[in-house]
Image (tube, rainbow, N blue to C red):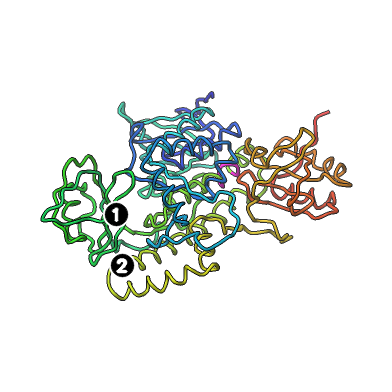
Amino acid sequence: MTTTEHPLGGEHFDVVIAGAGPVGLALAAELRLHGVTTLVLEKGRPGEGELRTLSLHSRTLESLDRRGLLAEFARAQERLPGLADFRRDLDDSGARGHFAGLFLLGRHTAEPVEQPHNLMLTHEILTELLTERADALGAVLRYGHEVTGLEQDAEGVTVRVRTAGGEAAVRGDFLVGCDGGRSAVRRGVGIDFPGTDPSLVSRMGRGTIEVHDGGELPATWQRTDGGWFMRMPDGRIAVTEWDVPEDLESPATAAELAASIERVTGTRITLTDVDIAHRFTDSARQASRYRAGRVLLAGDAAHIHFPAGGQGANLGLQDAFNLGWKLAAEYRGWAPAGLLDSYESERHPVAARVLENTRAQVALMRPGPQVGALRALFARLMEMDEVNKYLSEIIYATGIRYDPGPDGHRLAGTFLHDLPLTTADGPTRLVELLRPGRPLLLGLDGPGGGDARAAAAGWADRVDIVPAAAEGLGAAALLVRPDGYLAWAGDAPVTEGALRAALTAWCGPERPAAD
């Protein structure tokens, strides 16, 4: 990938991304599918990351499958025997996951799901996989480059960067902040980050516990009179208390973690061989807006919350899949008015609902007999199929339906699940047709389909037009967005006017083929 020098000085990229975590890397890969020159700036070093295990949920796995990445990610889980065994044990129990520590999700619903299992990966391995993806597609990754400020104008954004060699600047037509909850990009552009302050503190580490006086610690998860104690399948220890210390800024220590374990479990211990310790809270905040001119936010820079149900990484990755093609379309000049702004209008309410459900989970996790009684009642409610399905759709993001638009077709705004297709080139599957990351016009295989396909020819430079027959397609023609959601659906007979209107609304004006 080549870059240019900008008249204001420094290199120039189409898009600059702050933050080489999973969200920034996934976004970089999505942009590169469209040939957008992309620079990712990361203040840390390669391989640095948080001591976290991330559960990738249904909608994220479906998105990975549509880019041809699912099999590779599934193989990566097998590199982590503890996590793979935990995942299999959970599957054997009939549960897919938990709500507020109640491992009942998925047990009582027969609703068909394209990806009925989660994947569990460490933050380190997830970042490694997405780094390889972004690098292979030609994104430029620079570590030890901390974004310290920005100025934007009508033509682009100047990004100020601190490196080991001193201060530098780089230009981008757009800047996306994927730089975490303390985002320098969000602060630099003056976007508010309202929300709620911490009510609890969780401490996490990895080490060896020696129990004194014949005491015993739980093998997995346990709610106690003092909070929660958890042993993770990858060897981590986590403990949660509803007594928030005044100092949350200084580094966590092994002694602090050990003392917290003793308070929560009521068991005397010695903690040794601690290689890492950190803390986090349930502070829940969301950016008041996701875009300010040529600057956008995604991932934790746009929203933070307690990691109940493992929703954070999934929420951020789905931000990236939603934003990538829209930002590329804006840069390439074919985006219709409002397409880029639809990133905020679609994703902001989704994140707001995640903040709501994680706050609810924190309330259900509190110690005390009153909450204990509420948990028992809630567990009985989760035995009901309708309740279980509703909570599963919340946690796994499978209940999302975006605005169906003025036509309001029953399928518009929903996620199109994978299905076998028959095309002129032979049998294939929907997921394979979405690998390039382009809008897909699917169907138009019946009578009159040829005329409609001819009407769509003016969009062939940016839309893949695939006549196909399939059982269960649900409509005569479907306009599938690169992120897998349906932009438009048309029942037979599909008129040229309706098809042209849909393509113009989502993919901009047609471009007649050159003579």
Percent from the top left, x then y, of residue 127? 42, 37
Which is more foreground, mark 1 or mark 2? 1
Vertical arrangement, residue 239 with respect to residue 151, above or below: below
Vertical arrangement, residue 404 with respect to residue 450, above or below: below
* Residue drawn 20% across the image and 44% down it: 208
Q: Main secondary structure of the magenta part?
A: helix
Asked whether residue 324 is drawn in magenta, I would say yes
Q: Is residue 298 visible?
A: no
Percent from the top left, x then y, of residue 460? 75, 36
Vertical arrangement, residue 476 with respect to residue 163, above or below: below
What's the mark number on residue 179?
none
The quadrant in which residue 309 appears is: bottom left
Asked whether residue 361 is drawn in magenta, I would say no
The type of residue carrying mark 1 is: Met
Which residue in the rendered view is the most extreme toward the left? 213
Q: Quadrant of the C terminus?
A: top right
Q: Quadrant of the N terminus?
A: top right
The quadrant in which residue 333 appears is: top right
Residue holding disc 2: 366
Q: Is residue 410 left or right of residue 12?
A: right
**First reached walking from the N terminus: tag 1 or tag 2:** 1
- The local secondary structure at tag 2 comes to loop
Q: Is residue 59 visible?
A: yes
**In this view of the protein, which residue sits in the foreground, 250 or 378?**
378
* Residue drawn 50% across the image and 30% down it: 139
Residue holding disc 1: 230
**In this view of the protein, which residue sits in the foreground, 329 or 74?**
74
The type of residue carrying mark 2 is: Arg
Local crowd size for mark 2, using a 10 Å CA cut-off: few (<14), some (14–19), many (≥20)? many
Q: Magenta stretch: give its range.
A: 322-326
Percent from the top left, x then y, of residue 483? 60, 46
Percent from the top left, x then y, of residue 229? 27, 57
